[in-house]
Amino acid sequence: MLNRNASRNPDGAVVPAQVPSGSWASTPVVRRVMQGNKSRDTKPEIAVRSAVHALGMRYRVSARPLRDLRRTADLVFRNARVAVFIDGCFWHGCPQHHAPPKTNASYWATKIQGNKSRDEDTTEQLRMEGWTVLRFWSHEEPLSVAAQIAKVIATNVRAGKPIAGRKHNVND
């Protein structure tokens, strides 16, 4: 049986897999592992969603808060205009847990900084459109995160934030 990281050449000889030139991966194994990382439905996201759902709140999953913004929030509460992001400690540079890789260090430093800049830009754009943006780290306790989300949702609903995409007049 062939190793996952190998193939056969036309003569039938086993040839170890190669990392494509210019790749960020240091080995074929690293490449495969990193490609297997999920961008949604991670364990921390699912735990928070479960806790939020248990509190009776309903939301959209992996949705764009704004149609024209090519960014998705992990949970979106349209009526309250709240976008929730559960940021992974590695990918978003958690100050408490992020350990920069030693291999391809400059690539990863640039990548993580780019992610942080995009996060800041996303937050700013959503706030300019009247959204409340909540960001949590993946290591935070899901029940605590859910309680904080519930508090903000209740505050926004009491404050009468308009439904996304509609302009409301109190006298309508």
Image (tube, grey):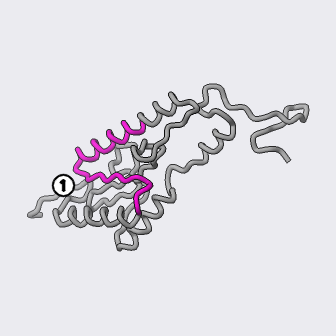
Taking the spot 22% from the left edge, 55% from the top edge, the residue there is 166
Viewer-nearest residue: 104 or 96: 96
Taking the spot 61% from the left edge, 48% from the top edge, the residue there is 36
The stretch in magenta equals 114-141
For mark 1, give the secondary structure: loop
Residue 148 vs residue 142: left or right? left
User: Residue 124 in the image: x percent, y percent?
Assistant: 27, 42
Q: Is residue 48 above or below residue 34?
A: below
Instruction: Tell me the quadrant of the picture where the C terminus can be found.
Output: bottom left
- Few, some or many C-alpha atoms within 10 Å of disc 1 (few <14, some 14-19, many ≥20)? few
For disc 1, the marked residue is 167
In magenta segment, residue 128? yes
Taking the spot 32% from the left edge, 66% from the top edge, the residue there is 147
Q: Is residue 36 above or below residue 28?
A: below
Q: Is residue 146 above or below residue 16?
A: below
User: Residue 45 in the image: x percent, y percent?
Assistant: 45, 58
Viewer-nearest residue: 40 or 70: 40
Viewer-nearest residue: 112 or 159: 112
In magenta segment, residue 125? yes
Q: Quadrant of residue 112?
A: top left
